[in-house]
Each structure stands twice: as structure tokens, then as C-alpha cells.
Amino acid sequence: MSDPLLALAEAYGVAASYRTDRGREVAVPRDTLVAVLAACGVDGSTPAAAGAALAARRASLAGRLVPPCVVVDGPRGPLPRLPRGARAEVLCADGRRRGLADGPLPAGTHALAVEAGGRRETAVLLVAPEPPAPAPYSWGLLVQLYFLLSRRSWGMGDLGDLAGLASWAGRLGADFVQLGPLHAMEPGRLPDPSPYRPSSRRFPDPMHVRVGDVPEHAGLADGPLALVRRLAGRAEALNAAVLEGRALIRREEVRALKLRALREVYEVPRTPEREAAFAAHTAREGADLTDFATWCALAEVHGPAWRSWPAGLRDPRSAEVARARRTLADRVGFHRWLAWITDEQLAGAQRAAEEAGMRIGLVHDLAVGVAPEGADAWALRHCLAEGMSVGAPPDDFNPAGQDWNQPPWRPDALAAEGYRPFAALLRAGLRHAGALRVDHVMGLFRLWWVPEGRPPSEGTYVRYDGAAMLAVLAAEAAAAGALVIGEDLGTVEAGVREALAGRGVLGTAVQRFEYEGGSEGRLGPLPPEKWREHCLATLTTHDLPSTAAWLGGEHVELRDRLGLLTRPVAQERAEAARERDGWLAELTRLGLLPDPAGETAALYAYLGRTPARMIGVWLPDLTGDLRPQNLPGTAGPHPNWCLPVADGEGRPVPLEELTGAPLAHHLAEAFAGRPEAHRDIEERHA
């Protein structure tokens, strides 16, 4: 390239142009390229600076004995080419040393040391595991934990409720419960209650803990016990208000009550066995937990926006932070303990699922990013791009594009760390799970970066080492003996789905988008036999109308009431009716209608006809709930992320009643014979 800025952008994986969802080529503003490169520590502000940076980049790579990161495709995959006469040694993750020719390499992240001509270099060596066996044919429930209230809850669903649901669903024949993210949220006020914008993806939020199930609760002395009982009484009132339809779920109040109660429980002396278990958890989580607990303690003193803290506290490795950690040792210890008891109850929920016969159990959800002022953004600031936000380019659904206000990984910094921060997130999500859902899994290959202060339309794609990211993902899943489900909805560049499938990552297929000719062409519902096999198939998601609302057209009426329609309501109603009627005609053609259990049951029976390995049942579909959990593009008009599961009349349904839902038992019977129906596919894989 004659233009040094464009050549420099290409060298760092920054797209100078991109193709829209309609196939139109769009040039990226030069100011955007300069800003994105600067966020990666590269100066492209002038032609001379760009030329110098490009020359330095090329010289750095050309002079190496081995690339900075080497990906080996399987333990027996092709080994890296080395200079003539070079000697190489693998420094394995477990501390062993071995040569490249000493048999199959262990899957995982290692270091490769190369010597030649008196020089020695070290590279990251990522060894992908062998592709896993196909996922079992299974069905399960799709759940947002907050909306799963029982009569024992403290105003929102908790991990005790999750264990109860898993026990019931497992006995019914379900093999998994897929959850929304349980990541730690920002402390204090929650202007955005979305679980997809957490403070930390590394640790779960203790607001999900069931206070009475913490073993030390039984040891409370009279005074603290009386206080905890008063707090429990206030929580019971919150819970009753939600279940009686008088109030929405109020996370901030629930969290405040639980943290106050748990502080009393924390003061109860632990038995030697419990103390040893706490110490083991703290040691295993290491510096990551120390950083997280320190941020939580500092946020209690200085507020949750760390960029406004005193300058010395903004660097987690500073002497000021070390001194503050000692001064706030009691607070830091409390937050370490909270992480431990939350982990214990997560383990209990997975154990309940397994004991009920589930082959997979819990499916945790890894959000695409974190809040810019949260714990992870502070602890991992050296790996995140300052002044950048993840989003999406303009498309038909969002003509202005999207800005998710979450800092992206810096590809260079992540590689320099040997992808260990990414691996740590995966390991945490897989710790008490049979599978992990990765939100916006296309982000392993490229992300849309939006410079701070600019509209999303002035962003650009930044490329990651997809082979390396996938190798890490596959290795962590294999080590945990777990599946991976990638949320690959929307615009997906060529080759991504194939690369994911090659590593055993399942895709996601949603009935609302599955049409002959694609979701844009919409030439009619996609016949069930044409669906992907290696995917999780669902009717809807947390961002879409419930099935009952879609069938009845309530989703159009809701958007009309909120003033969100861009076309006349009659036109929207007519289009929605055509879409629904087309699907009902397909169900009739297949002999699935009429169904005595209704149209929702027939739609799930349709999913059962597809070759999809996993089928997810949206929990509110079991009760006929008409309300969407999240209406994208609304922050006030609709109570996003605050609604309990309800029936078709809007009456909240507690867990105790939910387990008697007739549709649940009907679907369990319908799905019971599904593996037999697809035995031909099983035989082909065998």
C-alpha cells in the first residue's frame, strides 16, 4: 500500500473499510484509524509517524526466530517451522520441559523457547485439543435467574431457587438449565440493570446467594440473629410485593439487604474445616480474587467509578493500592469470603442438577464485555483499549449502529499475556457448569470498536487472532469436560461458523430468524430438516418477544404503546400476522397442528423435528407470559430485566407453581423420544 496509514492499519488488523449487511463497501474515517491505532499504542497521526511505526512493526516480526504466538491444531497437529539448526523446548503449563518431537503435545497454553545463532526467544504456544464428541441430543430450560422467584426468595431468584428448578427439571427429563450471566454487577445504584454489562466477568455476584443456606448462618448469636431476621422480614415483604404483582424486581434493595445480613454471617467463627476450605478457595483464585476484592473495598470508600479515584489508586499495581489493601484488610477479606460462599452455592446448584440426572447441568453465560468503570476494567486495564467501546456497525435493525459502552480487549496486549486473562474468564465460567454460552462469539475473530465521543457509525472492525482465541476456548472446555455454545446470531463473516464447528463449538438457531433465503429473503419457514445439527435451537431469546406474545401480536401492540414503531401500526400488525400465519401453515403441513396443547407446543414439536443437538425452552413460554424480559433500545419505557415469570394475565408465577405447568410435562414427553428419532445421525457420527 502507498498510503502508510492504511498499511499500518492493515498490519495491526484494523479495518480501513468494511462491508455492510447489505453488501455495500464503506470506507472508515481516517480519524477513526488514527484513534484506534493510538489505543493500541501505535502512532499513526501523521504520514511520517505511520511510516515509522509500520517499518518498526515489520522489522520486529521479520527478525524473530518464531512468531510471538504459535497455534498447533491438535496434540498431533503440524508443528511450527523453525530456522535451520534451531533448538526448541516446550515449557508446559504444568512445569514440565519437553522437546517438540517428544510425542503428542498436551492441549493448553504453554511457552515455546527457541535458540538459534546465539539468540533465544520465547513464544506463546497454544495447543488445541482434539475435537470433542458430538453434543448429546438434549433439551433444557432457558432462564434468567433473577426472574425465578420462589416463596423463599428475598425479592429475586437466588441460587437456592436454581437448585430447586434444576432438581425438578432433571427429574422431568431435561438435561440442562441455561442461565443469563451471573457476573458481579457494579455496587450501589444500577442505572443499567442488564446482566450483560457487569463489573466483573471473573466472579459471580453475591446478590444471588441464599443467606439462610450459608453454613455459618446457623451459628449467629442472639443479637446478630435478630438483626438478620429483621432484614429477612424486609426481604420477605419485597418478595411478596413482586409475587403479588405490586412491584418489580428491585436488585439494589435486594443486594443491600443481603450484604448487610451476610456481613453479620461473616463475623461468625468458622470451623477448622470451613476455614481450610476458605483458604483453599482464596489460594486457588490467587491474584485475580485479591484484585477483585480490593476493587470492591476501594469502591465502598471512593465510589464505583475508579477513574475518579485518587491518581495513585487507579493503578492496581501501585504502592498506594498495596497500602490501601492493608488499611482496608477487613473489607477485602469480606469480599473474598463473599466470592467463596457464592462459589459454594453455584457448586451446589450444579450438584443438584447432576443428582437429578442431567447430563449437562448448568450452562453459564459469558457476557461480551464489562463496564468501563468496573472491577475488571481496573484490574485488566493493561489489556483493554483505553478510549474505545465495543458496538456494532449500522444495519437494518439499528441504522445508527450500536455502542455497548464496554472496553474491548487489546489484541496485542492479550497475546503478550499468553491469553491468560481470557482463559481465566473461561475457567471461571466453566467451573460449575456442563457448558458455557459465549455471547457474541464472533467477537473472538473481530469486534467493532467505537472511539470515545464518536457515533457508532464512525467505528471500525479490529481483528483478533481467531485461531488463538478458539484454541484457548477449546482447551479450557476440554479440561472442564464441558460443551461450548456460541451466540452467532446476526451478521457473521465467512468462515467463522465453520471455524467454530471445527473446534466443537455449537451455534445458536432461533426460529424467528430461520427462513429459506435467510432472515432477509424470508422465502418461507426453513423446513426442519434443513436446520443446522450442531446448534442450540430455540423459539425466542431474552431480547425477543415471548412465544405467546409473538403468536398473539402483543409485541406489536407493546411497541405501539411505547411509541417505538417507525411504520403505521396497521402495517406492522399485518406483517406480524403474515409471519405468524406462515409458520402456522408450516406446522399444519407437517401435521403438528392442531395440537391439543396449543400452538406453542406445536412450535416446540417443530424444533424437535430439526437435527439440532440441543433444544432450549424459554421458561416464560411454559406459563404463557406475554412480556419481553428486555426490549432493546429502551432504557425507561419498559421495565427491562426487572420482571418475574408471569402467566398470560401478568400474574407472577412462583417456582412452587411453575413446576406444575402442564406444558412442561407435555414437552418432556414430546422430547423423550427425540434421540431415537435421530439415531441415523448418531450412527453416522459413530
Image (spheres, grey):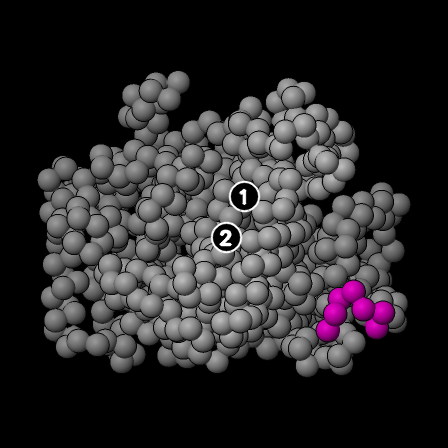
Region in magenta: 314-320
> Which residue is disc 2 drawn over?
464
Give the image quarter of residue 205. Answer: bottom right
At 40% from the left and 37% from the top, the residue drawn is: 501
Above-or-below relation of 79 to 552: above
At 53% from the left and 27% from the top, the residue drawn is: 78
> Which residue is disc 1 drawn over?
468
Q: What amino acid is at disc 2?
A: Tyr
Label 2: which secondary element: loop
Q: Nearer the viewer, residue 300 or 263?
A: 300
Place of residue 405 in the rendered image (x, y in percent of width and height, measured from the top left): 50, 71
Label placed on residue 247: none
| Residue 177 appears in the figure | no
Q: What amino acid is at disc 1?
A: Ala
Above-or-below relation of 499 to 582: above
Place of residue 155 in the rendered image (x, y in percent of width and height, measured from the top left): 55, 66
Pick the quarter of the image with the N terminus.
bottom left
Place of residue 661 in the rendered image (x, y in percent of width and height, measured from the top left): 37, 48
Label 1: which secondary element: helix
**Helix, strand or loop: magenta stretch:** loop
Q: Are marks 1 and 2 in contact (CB under 8 Å)?
A: yes
| Residue 535 appears in the figure | yes
Q: Residues within 10 Å of mark 1 (few under 14, many from 20)?
A: many
